[in-house]
Image: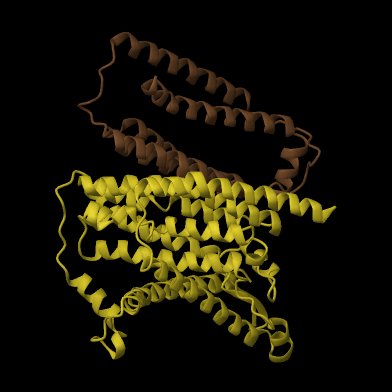
Chain colours: A yellow, B brown
């Protein structure tokens, strides 16, 4: 029994890793295509049919580039930064439920690497340490622009983490559980959390933009002020790691939004499908439903990036501390009162 | 298995704590402290206390250490900037540290016996956040609220100190 669990989990972890990498790869292409579409251009169309092989070409180019290293006394930390950024981006995927229980080979298989009973806290914890990769890499670059970028990333992360946590507490009051699997199970059919926590969802979405360092919150890498920001001194695959980590983050954070607020793998008519077509087929459709939701949120991320201009630094801080945190607190209090009234 | 993990984690905790003190560069010190905090979270998880482990990572590694790194990077501390302390300060600091160490040692020696405390929720699953919440808000509601007020006071104090400069300039 133990051995089969280990094999199951190993397979799930490898598959999740591969899918995350694949999605991150094609998110780079999607970003350029969507940017082109929004700006009325064609976008990359030379490599493969309609530019389908562009990510491979980009990857190959990054691998083949010459490695340069700045004259820094912190060679180890310089190499450690991109590695850490990638690791922390991938760690969050451990608690995401990708689908309901499959019934295969005479046993139930959970499509989740680890069903922690503090899953939600685990996600906040990993997100909160996610900025270390950028900070360490930026500091070790021994470049003042990189350093400023790292400092900006850190202060932005600290500011938006509070509002993010507060909006999740509102969700937590409703679900009464921290386990990601149970949160997913509770949203059966169209019983999605977003209908009960619209304000919380909005705050969480905005904070997700900030935590993934995406426009309009990409002050850490704004070209006009800081050259390339924290990856100014990086070249070749080390820079590739930083860029790739950003897209892996994008995918994982879209997955978290889908699971927490948009019903995870649930879709209307799932119980009907289970009755008529069996558990496994219904679950395969469920996984597709989850990926459609994830792709939609990846699209939203890109749509916002190519629509809105970047915030100024003081606007960023004002939005975080003076708007989002009070709003999240208000949302929390209202949720608590409503739950109390309904229960009595 | 658990024992081996414990020894590995303890080695990391003590080693990184020692390196925190021995590192010349303040940023390296801070990073070693982060490693130390992570391994302490590992200890909590070994003790079946997942909630405490996660909160420890969130608060110490995720918030406090990032702020500390932020401050060190902003101030750009260097060895050359370090103010040399007078001899008497060093002597007093050493003596104070030795006394605290002695106190801790005696507490650990005496604390070898385990305490059998009877909680109202005795025997329940303390991994569960729900049980933990019930204990905190029933039996320990007074200390819990006191800590909350203390934290609020600290926050107000911090805001007050940072605001003081502005009013001075206006006046």
Q: Relative to residue A63, is residue B94 drawn left or right?
A: right
Image quarter hosting the C terminus of chain B: top left
Q: Residue at x 70, y 67 (%)?
A: A186
Query: Taking B97 as reference, is A76 above or below it?
Result: below
In percent of width and height, residue A314 lies at: 38, 45
Q: Nearer the viewer, residue A243 or B54?
A: A243
List the single residue furthest toward the top: B88
| Relative depth, front residue between A252 and B17 | A252
**Is residue B132 left or right of A225 when viewed as pictured?**
right
Give the farthest residue toward the right. A344
Question: What residue is at 42 percent from the left and 57 percent from the top?
Answer: A88
* Number of numbered discs on residues: 0
Image position, residue A243 (x, y; %): 31, 64
Q: Does the image show residue B9? A: no
- Pinpoint residue A31: horizontal percent, then vertical percent: 35, 74
Q: Is residue A103 visible?
A: yes
Instruction: Name above or below for residue B9 compared with residue A27.
Output: above
* Residue A41 pos. (x, y %): 28, 80
Residue positioned most to the front:
B171
Which image quadrant for residue B12?
Answer: top left
Front-most of residues A31 and A199: A199
Left or right: residue A188 versus residue A125 is right
**Image quarter for residue A119?**
bottom right
State whether residue A29 is above or below residue A223: below
């Amino acid at each position: 029994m133990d051995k089969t669990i280990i094999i199951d989990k190993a397979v799930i972890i490898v598959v999740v890793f591969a899918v995350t990498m694949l999605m991150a790869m094609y998110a780079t292409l999607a970003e350029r295509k969507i940017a082109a579409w929004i700006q009325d251009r064609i976008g990359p169309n030379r490599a493969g049919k309609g530019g389908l092989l562009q990510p491979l070409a980009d990857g190959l180019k990054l691998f083949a580039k010459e490695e340069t290293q700045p004259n820094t006394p912190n060679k180890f930390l310089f190499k450690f930064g991109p590695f850490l950024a990638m690791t922390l981006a991938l760690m969050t995927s451990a608690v995401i439920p990708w689908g309901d229980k499959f019934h295969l080979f005479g046993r139930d298989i959970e499509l989740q690497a680890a069903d922690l009973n503090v899953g939600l806290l685990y996600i906040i914890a990993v997100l909160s340490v996610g900025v270390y990769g950028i900070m360490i890499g930026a500091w070790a670059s021994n470049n003042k622009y990189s350093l400023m970028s790292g400092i900006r990333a850190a202060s932005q992360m600290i500011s938006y983490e509070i509002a993010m946590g507060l909006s999740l507490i509102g969700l937590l009051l409703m679900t009464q559980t921290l386990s990601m699997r149970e949160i997913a199970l509770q949203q059966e059919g169209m019983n999605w959390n977003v209908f009960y926590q619209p304000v919380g969802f909005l705050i969480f979405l905005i904070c997700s933009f900030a935590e993934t360092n995406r426009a309009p919150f990409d002050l850490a890498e704004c070209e006009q002020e800081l050259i390339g920001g924290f990856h100014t001194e990086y070249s070749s695959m080390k820079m590739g790691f930083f860029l790739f980590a950003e897209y892996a983050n994008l995918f994982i954070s879209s997955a978290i939004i889908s699971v927490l607020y948009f019903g995870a793998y649930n879709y209307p008519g799932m119980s009907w499908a289970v009755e008529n077509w069996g558990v496994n087929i219904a679950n395969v459709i469920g996984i597709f439903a989850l990926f459609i939701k994830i792709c939609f949120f990846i699209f939203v991320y890109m749509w916002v990036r190519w629509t809105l201009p970047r915030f100024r630094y003081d606007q960023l801080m004002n939005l975080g501390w003076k708007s989002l945190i009070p709003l999240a607190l208000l949302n929390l209090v209202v949720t608590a009162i409503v739950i109390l009234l309904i229960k009595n | 298995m658990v024992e081996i993990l414990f020894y590995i984690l303890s080695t990391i905790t003590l080693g990184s704590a020692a390196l925190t003190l021995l590192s010349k560069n303040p940023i390296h010190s801070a990073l070693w402290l982060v490693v130390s905090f992570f391994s302490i979270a590992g200890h909590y998880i070994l003790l079946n206390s997942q909630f405490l482990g996660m909160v420890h990572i969130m608060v110490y590694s995720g918030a406090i250490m990032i702020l500390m790194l932020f401050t060190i990077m902003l101030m750009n501390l260097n060895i050359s900037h370090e103010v040399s302390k007078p001899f008497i300060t060093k002597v007093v600091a050493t003596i104070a540290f030795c006394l605290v160490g002695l106190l801790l040692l005696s507490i650990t020696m005496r604390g070898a016996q385990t305490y059998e405390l009877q909680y109202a929720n005795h025997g329940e699953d303390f991994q569960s956040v729900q049980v933990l919440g019930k204990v905190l808000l029933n039996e320990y509601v007074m200390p819990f609220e006191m800590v909350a007020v203390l934290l609020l006071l600290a926050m107000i104090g911090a805001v007050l100190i940072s605001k003081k400069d502005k009013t001075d300039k206006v006046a």
